[in-house]
Image (cartoon, coloured by chain):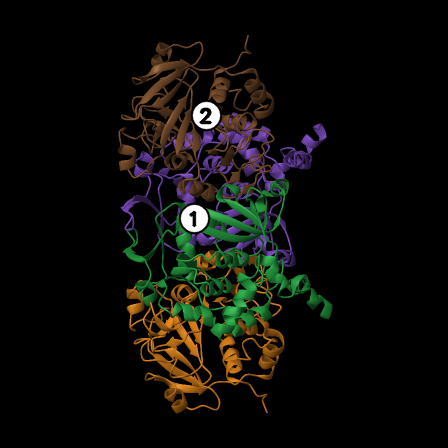
Chain colours: A brown, B purple, C green, D orange
């Protein structure tokens, strides 16, 4: 009987398996940071984690609350600046980035700026891009970690903060964004999705234990493509959960939500 | 690392109608929204306190329509400050392209004359005043900052006026003993004030950790505007200075505890 | 602070037809001219050894017509390396305008779309190989450099390959003990070699002063091409490595003297 | 009987008197550095000397041989980078710069690149701009320190490395160089010259002891304008020479030439 786990723990464990050893990764705080730490403590000890505020490859004593706090820089190999990290992405040195978002559309475009109303008088004002647009524009592979919910997976974002495949097809590169960059995978509590190479539309490739294709589609505001073979996602293992709970996020900042 | 004490003073002086550059802001933005000190905003990261969630007070103010917002990203604002520090009208970058963030920013797109690639131009940002909290400074304004830099050195050179608040004043001899430690040179600085714990309740790296309890208290009390009004009166308007604010929230005893957590001394104890 | 040992090795390996970026060069340029290692040059500061005068050998080579020269300035080359480090095709500046330096450079002039001002564009410079001599490095290539930086960090990020030579190897733990001391992160570095006194006869700040006597010897002997040939044979081609070169020019005893002068210890003695 | 002095000592003493207390100054090595050090030790203790390689306001134990050597950074308030110093000039923080040059024309344009032959195959190859073009373009007032000799003061430079007033009149600002910047004064062993405000042509304003207007004009390849009152330059004082010889340049790197 595997230990019980909540949706957030599932997503973090599944996402962390993507980060191969020796890869470079730019993150902010929250779930993406937890996934990176878990990967580093498990199968990718040489995973290089770069925090937006400037610290490179820290040995994290515990989950940092802010990208700039002393935890994020603890025993790092270097503390540089926000600008240096972004320029390192722009120069092409960073493989992955992990982003969340209040809204995501079928092309992987993200909204973290506002929902409802107008830009100058929004119904719900959100933090805006922060580093999201930068990482989404400049890192090779953008990964998204969010809850499967039709209020998040929308037909059309109220505001495109961070570029996915924009209008699909080749529109991302026509807009001038670096060739070869773009959304790579989306992890939710119910499924794993990638982007169909031609149309660049979101496509289900794996469904998490306890969920069906119908569940996934019912919680999505647009029609999802389906891969020819849809596999079943490996649930979180004992070790993954143990390390996540005891070492990565003992204060349950993220997995407690 | 934000000049919290200065933000409190801005509210106490009732400053209004300022333009603000919200570049990776957290608690400082929360305070300035509480005092409605600005009505024009360049927004990189606002309203949020990272893993702690969103500030209800900041959201209310940003949703009120009282603020004219121009969207940017964290890199865009550091690029704009870089341009000003270089004394050039803009620097190019490759972010923003194709998004609404671009449409609501003041960026322009050009085709690079060398490569034909599309580039997003970032116009220089010359703040009238920059307020920077640093670890150490001498009386002339030669500053030392430990740990990560945001764009402090650039910011001091970009701004027309720069005010420094520091944890400790040190001697000019000490600065000259190891010049490589200096981050901001004196000729960029117009005023220096010694404000120990000037970043409380934020985390001053290598000095004291953030007071998470107190930050959560802010977020809790903001949910009820009336309660929040009293909270502000007690913690800002009725306080003569930053020390009075600290004494109302645990005083020296808490500062000691925050220092212990910062240096992970408790961890060594647990080992 | 130049990688002199590496320059000697370049000559020993008979490398030719390279492109070279002469950015605030002095003795390193002199050596590469002696071996005619390059035939294409971006020139910021070349031929001269600052207050010591001009190198006859460098002048002869530069006057031979064998080198295709593009003129720049010291700031232009650091701006070009900055652009490459930013991953953008160019950065603008306000120098070069109206001069022959501009006409013989690869810069372009545009009118700023924001201000209409004329700007000189500096195209990104992506060296195939950068060789940087540093004070300390761990085996992964995390480097510490003390004293002034040329554009070392930018250069490592701009170049496709980066080779580090260091005075001393240190442990990764030591690097992590104080991350703010690190100037170049490991992922920008492809090779690390420990070469104590790797910058001799130049001045390695905080380590050893320049061997002015030996540098003058170079300038003197260069005046007679035949004598100079023997001098190169003895000091470079017949030397297995940098230590053999040092041993032929005063060995450990001289290195100790240069360390004493560097730390101005003799001054304290005179007091 | 004033102590005897050579041409170089005269120029350094006279030039150093221009540098008022509290001014900022960007220099390379050689005579300009000696003039700056002399000024700092005499009447301008708060003169801020910035060395091209990055050191700011050092307390110089002795004349540095190179802008990057440890002397140049000794007890400085800050050691930054070459780029930072140039950007500080570009931002408008630096009042003066001191430059030499193999050739100078009537508008103060300087040549430090090559003389004779062609650019690709020059008769005499020189170091090129180094930081000269940058300082000459970006600092408010450019001062030149060179020997009065018609091989140096030429009708037309073989190559304009560093901009003076270019073609005179308003041509410097039409070329796009920052308004308000430009050549200010020229110091030679025989005279002090400035630039006539309208035409921007070099104009004699003071003649050094032992020389006449004829001497100056005879050693100049173009016709010099003359100020309405031409004063006589104060010779170096005892104190100036004493400090120059004992503290500023004891090894006679510069004053020995």
Label 2 is found on which chain of the structure? A
Give whichever of B103, C187 is nearer the camera.
C187
Q: Is residue A203 above or below residue A62?
A: above
The quarter in which the N terminus of chain C is drawn is: bottom right
Mark 1 neighbour density, 10 Å: few (under 14) some (14–19) many (20 or more):
many
The quarter in which the C terminus of chain C is drawn is: bottom right
Which residue is found at the position 45% from the left and 36% from the top?
B33
Furthest residue toward top? A1
Picture coordinates of residue C178, whole percent (x, y): 61, 43
Which residue is found at the position 60% from the left and 32% from the top?
B211
Q: Is residue C213 above or below residue A257?
A: below
Q: Quadrant of residue C72?
A: bottom left
In the rendered structure, the answer to whether residue A181 lies left or right of residue B206 reads: left
User: Residues under labels 1 and 2: Cα distance?
Assistant: 29 Å
Picture coordinates of residue D64, whole percent (x, y): 56, 68
Mark 2 neighbour density, 10 Å: few (under 14) some (14–19) many (20 or more):
some
In the rendered structure, the answer to whether residue C112 lies left or right of residue B59 reads: left
Residue D66 visible somewhere in the drawing: no
Q: Which residue has dot 1 on it?
A: C158
Q: Which residue has dot 2 on it?
A: A18
SS for callout 2? loop
Label 1 is found on which chain of the structure? C
């Amino acid at each position: 009987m595997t230990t019980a786990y909540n949706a957030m723990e599932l997503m973090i464990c599944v996402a962390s398996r993507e980060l191969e050893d020796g890869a470079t990764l730019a993150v902010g705080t929250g779930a993406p940071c937890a996934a990176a730490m878990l990967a580093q403590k498990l199968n990718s000890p040489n995973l290089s984690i770069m925090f937006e505020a400037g610290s490179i490859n820290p040995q994290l004593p515990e989950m940092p609350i802010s990208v700039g706090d002393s935890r994020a820089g603890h025993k790092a190999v270097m503390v540089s600046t926000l600008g240096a990290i972004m320029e390192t992405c722009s120069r092409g040195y960073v493989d992955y980035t992990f982003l969340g978002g209040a809204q995501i559309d079928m092309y992987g475009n993200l909204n973290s700026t506002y929902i409802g109303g107008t830009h100058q008088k929004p119904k719900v004002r959100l933090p805006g891009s922060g580093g999201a647009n930068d990482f989404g524009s400049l890192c090779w592979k953008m990964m998204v970690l969010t809850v499967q919910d039709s209020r998040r997976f929308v037909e059309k974002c109220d505001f495109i903060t961070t570029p996915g495949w924009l209008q699909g097809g080749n529109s991302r590169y026509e807009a001038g964004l670096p060739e070869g960059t773009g959304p790579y995978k989306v992890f939710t509590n119910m499924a794993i999705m990638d982007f169909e190479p031609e149309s660049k539309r979101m496509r289900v490739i794996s469904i998490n234990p306890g969920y069906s294709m119908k569940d996934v589609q019912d919680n999505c505001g647009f029609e999802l493509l389906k891969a020819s073979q849809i596999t079943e996602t490996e649930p979180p293992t004992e070790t993954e959960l143990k390390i996540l709970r005891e070492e990565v996020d003992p204060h349950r900042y993220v997995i407690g939500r | 690392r934000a000049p919290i004490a200065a933000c409190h003073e801005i509210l106490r002086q009732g400053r209004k109608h300022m333009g603000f550059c919200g570049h990776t802001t957290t608690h400082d933005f929360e305070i300035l929204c509480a005092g409605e000190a600005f009505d024009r905003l360049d927004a990189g990261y606002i309203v949020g306190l990272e893993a702690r969630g969103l500030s209800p007070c900041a959201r209310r103010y940003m949703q009120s329509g009282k603020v004219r917002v121009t969207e940017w990203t964290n890199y865009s604002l550091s690029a704009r400050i870089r341009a000003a520090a270089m004394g050039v009208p803009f620097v190019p970058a490759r972010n923003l392209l194709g998004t609404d963030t671009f449409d609501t920013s003041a960026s322009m797109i050009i085709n690079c004359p060398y490569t034909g690639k599309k580039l997003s131009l970032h116009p220089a940002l010359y703040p009238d005043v920059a307020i920077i909290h640093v670890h150490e400074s001498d009386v002339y304004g030669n500053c030392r900052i430990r740990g990560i830099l945001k764009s402090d050195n650039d910011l001091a050179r970009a701004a027309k006026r720069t005010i420094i608040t520091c944890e400790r004043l040190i001697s000019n001899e000490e600065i000259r003993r190891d010049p490589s430690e200096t981050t901001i040179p004196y000729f960029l600085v117009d005023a220096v004030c010694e404000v120990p714990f000037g970043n409380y309740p934020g985390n001053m790296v290598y000095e004291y950790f953030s007071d998470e309890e107190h930050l959560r208290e802010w977020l809790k009390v903001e949910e009820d505007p009336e309660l929040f009004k009293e909270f502000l009166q007690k913690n800002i308007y009725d306080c003569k200075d930053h020390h009075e604010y600290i004494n109302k929230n645990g005083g020296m005893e808490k500062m000691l505890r925050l220092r212990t957590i910062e240096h992970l001394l408790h961890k060594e104890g647990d080992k």
